[in-house]
Amino acid sequence: MSSREDSNPQTVAVVGPGAIGTTVAAALHEAGRTPRLYGRTYRARLELRAADARIQVPGPVHTDPGASAAVADIVFLAVKATQLQAAAPWLRVLCGRGSVVCVLQNGIEQVELVAPLVPSGTEIAPAVVWSPAQRQSDGAVLLRGDARISLPRIPAALRVASTLRGTRCAVELEDDYVTTAWRKLLQNATAGLMALAGRRSGMFARPDVARLALAYLRECARVARAEGALVEDRILQDILAGFRSAPADMGTSILVDREAGRPLEWEVRNEVISRLARRHGLSTPISDVVVPLLAAASDGPG
């Protein structure tokens, strides 16, 4: 490993200081590796509230990509898939040859979506985010459990892991990242039912909703297996159990966006599964209902 990879702290940027971006920024700041912050809305500082601490990350959150912004070694991209094009100007000025972009975003096509937006020579590390973080009405972020991300065991991800080493954001390096990414996608796809129902996790206590969720999980798992993921039946039961055991008022980002009237990440969380199913000749009758309804809830018309 080169001296650049060993040096800590490196120059680090966080693009998109929402719930996940704030969590990562706070973890880095707490460990003495304060990142530079970039986003749509100016803030003097960020605040993370965890069970054991309140962490304030000094800003400001820079909002003008045209202003001076030095290239960073590590860029944590924490915007939603629906906000990628808006974040593209930041990626152009913050990334350079040798930079690593860690994509803290839903979906299994992160590399394909981000690669066209970064300069040549930029490396991309996809990530699976497991942190239960929620933005509060006053702008702070509440972390309702442990912060954790999963990364593939590739050189770019090793540099990200080094940057986060010793922070409250745990990093797991996965040899079978495909399976890990699909497991999270199955969870996210099922959470889309919450956006359609307009209800939080408590809705999964209903036996009829639980049956629907499990049938949807089984349908999606067939696609995951066709794509090379090792998804056992017990994983599907675990995902459903996670929804049923969560606090009844626990939400999900796609539900929050639905309630706020914002575009939904229906393509990267749900449509991708039915699209890949067609490639393998698999039928997806539940997806064929869920996806159009999510698309309409997101984009209209009406």
Image: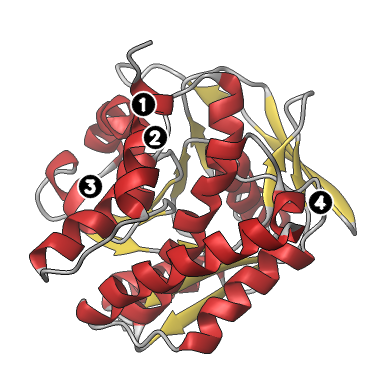
**Occupied quadrant, residue 156:** bottom left
Q: Are marks 4 and 2 in contact (CB under 8 Å)?
A: no
Q: Label for residue 293?
A: 2
What secondary structure is marked by label 2?
helix
Q: Amino acid at mark 3?
A: Val
In this orientation, which residue lies closer to the viewer: 167 or 239? 239
Q: Earlier in the sequence, mark 1 or mark 4?
A: 4
- Please name whichever residue, 101 or 66, is drawn nearer the observer in this view of the structure: 101
Residue assigned mark 3: 114
Label 4: which secondary element: loop
Q: Residue furthest front?
A: 208
Taking 222 as reference, is 40 above or below it?
above
Q: Residue at x 12, y 55 (%)?
A: 121
Name the residue located 9 percent from the left edge and 64 percent from the top edge. Answer: 279
State whether residue 225 is above or below residue 50: below
Disc count in the image? 4
Apparent side of residue 31 relative to residue 121 in the rendered image (left or right): right
Q: Which residue is mark 4?
A: 248
- Identify residue for label 1: 296
The amino acid on which the numbered mark 4 sits, given as a three-letter code, is Ala
Residue type, numbered disc 1: Ala
Q: Classify 42 as above or below 103.
A: above
Find residue 173 and name its label: none
Image coordinates for residue 157, horizontal then vertical, percent:
36, 71
How far, Cα to Cα, is label 3 from label 4? 35 Å
Q: Which quadrant: the N terminus?
A: bottom left
Q: Specify which label sits upstream in the sequence, 1 or 3.
A: 3
